[in-house]
Image (spheres, rainbow, N blue to C red):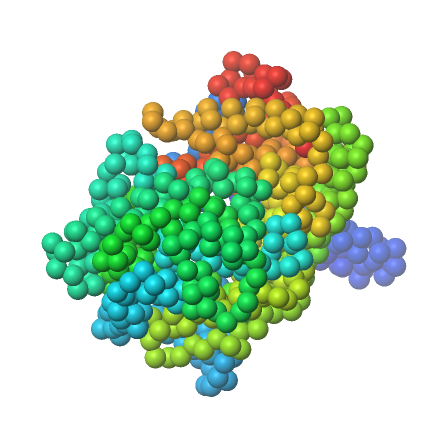
Amino acid sequence: MTAMIRICAAFVSCFWLRSDSTRRDAASGSRARRLASYATLGAAIVCALLVCARAHAQSIIDRDDMDLTVRPGDNFFRYANGGWLDRTEIPADKASYSVKEIMHGKREQAIFGLIEKISRLESVAEGSPEQMIRDLYATGMDFEKIDAEGVEPLAEQFEIIAQIVSTIDLQRVAARLHALGFDPLFRITVRQDLKANDTYKLHLLQGGLGLPGSVYYAHESDRAVAIRAKYVKHVARMLELLGEAPDAAVVQAQAVMEIETRLARHSLSRREKRNVAALHNPMSIADLQALCPAFDWKLYFAAFSDIDFGDVVVDVPAFFEEIGCMLGEVPVADWKPYLRWNLVNEIAQYLSADFAEQDHRFFSEFLSGTTEMVDRHTRVLEVVSAGLGELVGQLYVKEHFSPAAKQKMLELTGNLKKALELRIRNLDWLDESTREAALAKLRAMRIKIGYPDKWKDFSALEIKPDSYGRNLVRLGRFLHQERLARFGKPVDPDEWTLPPQLPNAGYFSQKNEIVFPAGILQPPVFDMRADDAVIYGSIGFGIAHEMIHGFDDQGRKFDRSGKLNNWWTDEETAEFNRRAELLVEQYNGFAPFDDLHVDGKLTLGENIADFGGLTVAYQAYQMSLKGRIPEPIEGFTHDQRFFLAFARFFRGKIRDEALRRKIREDKHPWNEFRVNGAPFNLPEFYQAFDIRPTDRLYRSQEQRPLIW
């Protein structure tokens, strides 16, 4: 009998009982019978509601989504998700398809619904959220005008590049492009100082590359060599679209590649950049000038902004030292196509169809394996949501976030904090002073849920119905100037780092806070109708995962106030690293290709957070039961449902090309490795699914670390 039939049967039973009792009451006139009738009615209603709840709980963990022919200990990802994987196709315009893409799709539908409502308004006030959202979307969907304009919205920037005749000109132009939010040569921004985190500092950051990371310029695998060759052809084609003759475009593209290769050789890899302490190198302007003497920093900063920034923070001194060398060695004639390429590369997908399609052919089709281009509607919605952030968020939360969801999240976070506190108190490898420092950090950790109490001010932004390209240039300038305007002001602890409609979450070390936007608090990640085992195994795990980031291999270097400050003894640091190395070895063992395996060092922070988050969420769930043992649902115990919900949280498929990119570029391991990784360090998982030493993913006691 289906769930719907059971529900209907329960309600029919309820009404039958009521009508029968009413007839008997009428005949006897008995008050006692009337009370008995109402009690029976109430019981029937409760019964029906329980059937509804149970039916929904059963639908959360669906056997049809699983592959019960696989032993959980051999491949838990496949065991939990095999049925779904078999019947799910990755959409042609996507590199992967998972819960993440499902959530993003829901967000896009919600935002489009808001735009449709706005479009029906007879009038909107100039400068209002409705006007800016409406006009940015409308100009983005004006295909004919976008194609007719080509790169005309960037004409002014291309003109100043064309006028460069010296390295002095080059530096002025780089400053002007940086002020517009573009990133040639390097990146520049204002953000919190790592050690004095109550102040904003100007940061100079490595950058200037067109490929997704420095590893692509140096690796000698067949795939990497093919990528570089294809990349040069791609750059040449883009320069052709800008008006260069084919032969000249090829020569210029090779010059671009040589410049980027030099920058890449002196850039830190993604793994190296995870050592946040190494990225904090405060310098006076005199120190910077001595490091990079060929670059006139006073001239550059004067062209960049009228703010006196004082000392700056340089993330990779060797990178800026190389820029100084390159200014004296690379001909000005080579810098000009580099700047033109850098400019068009950053905005190509938003330009006319010829640029957008060429951009897709290299970055999406060749690098990631997609076979179709994302439609313009979806791309424009992404720009509206990301660019207008909290403007969209204000409208989104009014319709798509309930007070009940926030209350449930507050309850969950409170329980998870208690569980983590208990674990910290009982860890035998921490000394008392370190334990107290960890507890103080946990107590001070702020958790932001849903949306901010105070919205950002967008009054300085001008969005017009004239041109999509011009609107994007205006938006880039506004966002960059907004960052610069923070300089000299106190850090606002109530400012949100993520927009409310984003289906994601994050921990931010320098504020010691977790942000859970409204966008992620929806099914399938957060379903308030699910049983507690599922809730704790999914969104509960997500909350605990972010908490543990405050104590992972990099987060642990920040104290309770968010300052970079070592509060560990040398002995504890060594012990932490020894335990973490067991996770490095575990994830290094995941090798989906003969020539490529997961980088356990690059992904270590996420792997610690997964392992610790799952451990804390499980303990919080057990604490919430208060000794109760829930009945199995559809044959799965409550412990099994907890771990199955975790596996469902990471359900997804990915193309081979995209998986290669993810392994090289992303600190997050692919979902399969997360599901087949973290649980195999928890003894409770072994008990729940009878994991045996003969199972492929079994880990001995000595291989399982206890960190948090």
Residue under the image location 75 percent in, 54 percent down: 41
- Horizontal side, residue 480 vs residue 549: left or right: left
Q: Give the residue at x 46% y 55%.
A: 289
Q: Is residue 354 left or right of residue 571?
A: left
In the image, residue 125 sits, relative to residue 320, either above or below, namely: below
Q: Is residue 259 left or right of residue 276?
A: left
The answer, for residue 542, to whether it is visible in the render is yes
- Camera-side residue: 237 or 623? 237
Q: For this view, does 446 lie left or right of residue 234? A: right
Taking the view exactly as shown, the residue that stands out farthest to the top is 694
**Image quadrant where residue 112 sits:** bottom left
Q: Is residue 415 above or below residue 687?
A: below
In the image, residue 392 lies at what x, y percent?
51, 68
- Give residue 277's position: percent from left, percent from top: 58, 42
In the picture, which quadrant includes the C terminus?
Answer: top right
Q: Residue at x 47, y 26 (%)?
A: 588
Q: Nearer the viewer, residue 32 or 516?
A: 516
Residue closer to the observer: 329 or 512: 329
Location of residue 59 (image quadrant)? top right
Which residue is found at the position 41% from the left and 36% from the top? 663
Q: Position of residue 410 (x, y in %)?
A: 71, 53
Q: Residue 599's x, y, as percent?
A: 45, 31
Q: Quadrant of the N terminus?
A: top right
